[in-house]
């Protein structure tokens, strides 16, 4: 069966955008694309397509690329760094568990990782739910690894969270996501990690938001929280109240200083399996939250025209626009604070996250010829003529 979908850049207003390069994970590698969708640079990290799916990729300030590759039937998951010319310069395979979904490179060179591993059997047996007691249950271990590949910090979720705090909606173990990716065995499903940047809340004396504390998103528990790095205690948590609260959210991120909304937390609220308010069903939202008042200060909401059940992400851009990746539709778009779509691109790649970087983000991107910025105005309607 043939289905017709547009691909490439379908909307582009150069004067209204934060123009730069967008990093997209691709089959067999990663690439930087221009605003018109051309490839400006690429890293063919897996020419033979045998090394596993790229969960996440980030461009570093020195022009290197860091990727997280998930486990395959033959290999353990790992994190790897490449130079601009696609040469591998560093790799780490965690012993703490299976790395997945997210990582956060630190300025000092160390990296925060999310690693999944089975909860000790004696702890699982404390759960009230017999279905969980009868299965292997996984949680996540947060670790920080140094450039010398030494674990310098770790935090085990089951040691700090109530084992009976769980999503009340079960998922059949034969569903497409796999037998161990459900609310029974995959307890928290942490999908994002960030070390808090310098921020105005800490500057005002709020210790909960101390830079270096760790912000994570737990999809199965519809919760984002901050771990106090020094004490290991949970310093802050948020479930939200927009249409009943978050549901299956991804990519929580505290906005850095110098960017509009600095200190607020932005998150992609997927709307997957809401159980508090069915008005949330079939709708995704991008929320910007003041973490002190826990009030939503900005939301992107396009009702049932905007929905991605799983994955996806959002990024606040330096000009105040927001980049959004509606993964299920493979649609990347940029919206203004007034929620006007000023750039839209449909990718053919099976990416999970995308990130926008300014032209001069690193010496290597600054040295590239500046791309042409050609406006794209979609037609009022698109019709396909009958075959002759």
Image (tube, rainbow, N blue to C red):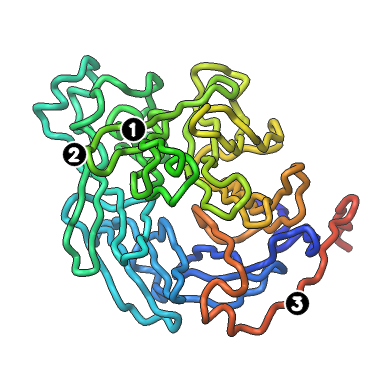
Residue identifier under label 2: 118
Mark 2 or mark 1, earlier in chain: 2
Q: Secondary structure at mark 1?
A: strand
Mark closer to the observer (3, 2): 3
Quadrant of res 369: bottom right
Would residue 218 be seen by someone viewing this image from the given angle? no
Quadrant of res 235: top left
Q: Which mark is residue 363?
A: none
| Discs 3, 1 touching: Cβ within 8 Å | no
Residue 225's spot in the image, x, y percent?
Answer: 38, 34
CA separation in Å, label 2 and label 1: 25 Å
Would residue 55 be seen by someone viewing this image from the given angle? yes
Q: Which mark is residue 235?
A: 1
Q: Which mark is residue 372?
A: 3
At 71% across and 35% down in the image, what residue appears? 302
- Looking at this view, is 11 or 72 the one in front? 11
Q: Quadrant of the C terminus?
A: bottom right
């Amino acid at each position: 069966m043939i289905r017709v979908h547009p691909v490439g850049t379908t909307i582009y207003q150069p004067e209204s955008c934060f123009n730069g390069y967008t990093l997209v994970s691709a089959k067999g590698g990663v690439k930087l694309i221009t605003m018109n969708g051309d490839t400006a640079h690429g890293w063919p990290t897996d020419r033979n397509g045998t090394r596993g799916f790229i969960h996440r990729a980030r461009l570093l300030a020195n022009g290197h690329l860091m990727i997280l590759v998930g486990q395959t039937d033959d290999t353990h998951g790992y994190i790897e760094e490449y130079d601009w010319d696609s040469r591998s310069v560093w790799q780490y395979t965690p012993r703490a568990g299976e790395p997945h979904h997210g990582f956060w490179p630190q300025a000092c060179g160390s990296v925060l990782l999310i690693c999944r591993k089975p909860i000790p059997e004696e702890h699982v047996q404390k759960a009230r739910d017999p279905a969980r007691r009868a299965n292997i249950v996984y949680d996540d271990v947060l670790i920080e690894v140094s450039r010398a590949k030494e674990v310098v910090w770790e935090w085990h979720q089951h040691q700090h969270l109530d084992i009976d705090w769980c999503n009340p909606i079960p998922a059949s173990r034969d569903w497409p996501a796999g037998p161990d990716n459900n609310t029974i065995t995959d307890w928290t499903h942490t999908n994002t990690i960030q070390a808090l940047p310098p921020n105005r809340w800490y500057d005002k004396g709020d210790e909960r938001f101390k830079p270096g504390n760790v912000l994570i998103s737990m999809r199965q528990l519809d919760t984002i929280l901050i771990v106090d790095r020094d004490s290991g205690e949970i310093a802050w948590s948020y479930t939200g109240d927009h249409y009943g609260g978050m549901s299956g959210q991804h990519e929580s991120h505290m906005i850095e200083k110098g960017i509009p909304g600095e200190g607020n937390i932005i998150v992609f609220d997927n709307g997957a399996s809401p159980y508090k308010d069915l008005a949330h069903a079939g709708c995704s939202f991008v929320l910007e939250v003041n973490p002190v008042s826990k009030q939503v200060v900005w939301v992107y909401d396009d009702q049932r025209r905007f929905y991605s059940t799983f994955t996806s992400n959002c990024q606040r851009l330096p000009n105040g626009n927001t980049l959004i990746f509606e993964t299920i539709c493979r649609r990347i778009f940029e919206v203004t604070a007034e929620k006007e779509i000023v750039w839209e691109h449909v990718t053919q790649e099976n990416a999970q996250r995308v990130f926008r970087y300014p032209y001069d983000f690193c010496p290597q991107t600054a040295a590239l010829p500046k791309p042409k910025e050609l406006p794209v105005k979609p037609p009022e309607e698109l019709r396909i003529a009958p075959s002759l």
